[in-house]
Image: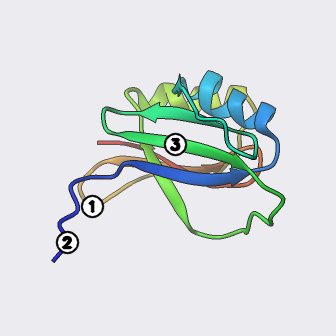
């Protein structure tokens, strides 16, 4: 049996790299990572200690779906204020899970569903 240790990265398709870099880098504060030269544009971010987020610009449909990834924040209430101040619609939540952690869902500028959580 293969034994998975941890997540390494999540890759998502975006269309507007400038707007998505603003969302993930400036609004959410993710630190940029060096990215190898590929045959398509993109950008990489560090997420926590062991995971990265890879933005990949492709001409493919970004579906409206419940598929998502979750980012944990330090200050949930401030995150809500910052999202609202930047006209980022909260599409579900805020709410509480059974373990009493906070959650909300929003979409990045290209429509990818992102969960924001605080445990």
| Secondary-structure class at tag 3 | strand
Give the vertical position of 118 relative to 60 (above or below).
above
Q: Are marks 3 and 1 in contact (CB under 8 Å)?
A: no
Which image quadrant is residue 99 in?
Answer: bottom left
Could one spot residue 60 in this view of the protein?
yes
Give the vertical position of 1 relative to 89 (above or below).
below
Q: Nearer the viewer, mark 3 or mark 1?
A: 3
Residue drawn at x 31%, y 48% as measured from the top left: 101
Q: CA distance from mark 3 to mark 2?
A: 24 Å
Q: Is residue 97 left or right of residue 57?
A: left
Residue drawn at x 81%, y 48% as measured from the top left: 15
Q: Which residue is mark 2?
A: 2
Indicate which disc residue 55 carries. Answer: none
Q: CA distance from mark 3 to mark 1?
A: 27 Å
Q: Position of residue 87 (x, y in %)?
A: 76, 34
Q: Which residue is mark 1?
A: 98
Q: Nearer the viewer, residue 35 or 111?
A: 35
Circle 2 crowding by C-alpha within 10 Å: few under 14, some 14–19, many from 20: few
| Secondary-structure class at tag 1 | loop
Indicate which disc residue 53 carries. Answer: 3
| Secondary-structure class at tag 2 | loop
Quarter of the figure that contains the N terminus = bottom left
């Amino acid at each position: 049996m293969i034994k998975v240790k941890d997540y390494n990265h999540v890759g998502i398709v975006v269309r507007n790299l400038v707007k998505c870099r603003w969302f993930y880098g400036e609004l959410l504060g993710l630190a940029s990572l060096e990215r190898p030269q590929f045959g398509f544009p993109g950008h990489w971010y560090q997420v926590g200690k062991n995971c990265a987020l890879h933005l990949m610009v492709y001409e493919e449909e970004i579906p409206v779906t419940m598929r998502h990834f979750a980012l944990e924040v330090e200050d949930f209430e401030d995150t809500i204020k910052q999202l609202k101040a930047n006209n980022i619609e909260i599409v579900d939540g805020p709410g509480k899970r059974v373990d009493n952690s906070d959650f909300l869902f929003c979409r990045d500028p290209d429509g990818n569903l992102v969960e924001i959580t605080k445990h």
